Amino acid sequence: MPRLVSSCFRSASKVFRFGFLLSGILFVTSTTEQSTFAADWADLQLTFVYDAAELPKLEPVEMAKDPACEALWKDAKPMAEDLLVDATTKGIKNIVFYPDPKKSGLVSGDAHPDLLKAPEGSVVLDNVKCVFEPHIFSIRPSQTLMVKNSDTMGHNALFNVFSNAGVNPLIPAGGSKDVVFTKSERAPIPVQCNIHPWMISYMLMFELPYVGISDASGVLKMEKLPAGKPITFKIWHEKMDKSIDSVTLDGKEVEWKKGLVEFTLKPGANNLGVVKIKPTEFKK
């Protein structure tokens, strides 16, 4: 009997050591796979600067055709948002940068797993003092867009879409309407209020979940892009004619023909530098 117990104990000990070793191998393999997976993704940053000594002149929005709208601003007037440049940094706001839908070399399956599904929450486009807020916004196909009206007068929102069925909801004072587009669009989509023709916003709704919009300092960021793969990006701004074709990148003048440029990102952070754009590129 003692020999039987001893033999069973030795066998159990071997099984335990083998199981422990196997679990250790599995743990190391799993950790290695996660690290390799995480290393395949990249973050991008660019800073866009207005390349001129004199800043563009801000023009007030003319609302005289609707005294009710004009009265909301009292003595002040809203300024046009079509070319906003920071007085201190000369950073250009609302530059849009995204993988070109046709030439990027990416498909939706290349996106980071966290970005494959559209966010569950709604994106809000508001009417505030007869101005759309925000001026430019990004949304995913099938994500709900709440068109809100915080004003005391009615507005409408005409979506000049191409791939989706067009809509033009009337939003009563204090009300809202939900809009859902199921297909991606290949270019920024203007949104207009026919009642107040100075009102315009732009909707970005691409198949790929990557789009950057520069902030008030001209800084633009995108996260969780595929690393190690050439990606063709598109630059867009509402004041350009057909495209921004020539820029200065970190002091060197380069051609971005038809607004296209290719970057291969390394894993992790990629600060691609300062992009200076001359006034002549804003032709509209």
Image (cartoon, helix red, strand yellow):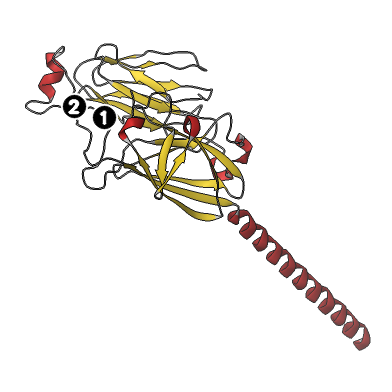
Q: Compared to 282, does 91 lie above or below?
A: below
Crowding near the residue tagged with mark 1, few <14, some 14–19, many ≥20 C-alpha atoms within 10 Å: some
Category of crowding for the residue at label 2, using alpha-carbon neighbours closer than 10 angstroms: few (below 14), some (14–19), many (at least 20) = few
Foreground: disc 1 or disc 2: 2
Q: Earlier in the sequence, mark 1 or mark 2?
A: 2
Q: Secondary structure at mark 1?
A: loop
User: Amino acid type of disc 2?
Assistant: Glu
Which label sits on residue 81?
1
Q: Quadrant of the N terminus?
A: bottom right
Q: Position of residue 201 (x, y in %)?
A: 33, 24
Residue 121 horizontal/vertical position (percent): 43, 35
Q: In screen coordinates, is 134 left or right of 72? A: right
Establish if 206 lies above or below 11: above
What count of labels does the image hold?
2
For the question of whether residue 119 can be seen, the reply is no
Coordinates of residue 149 in the picture (x, y in percent):
27, 22
Label ID, residue 59: 2
Quadrant holding the C terminus: top left
Residue 175 seen by the camera = yes
Residue lying at 48% horizontally and 29% vertically, measured from the top left: 258
Q: Nearer the viewer, residue 194 or 156?
A: 194
Q: Residue at x 37, y 36 (%)?
A: 95
Q: What kind of residue is marked 1?
A: Glu
Picture quadrant of residue 230 = top right
Q: Residue at x 13, y 23 (%)?
A: 72
| Residue beneath the point at 63% across and 37% down | 109
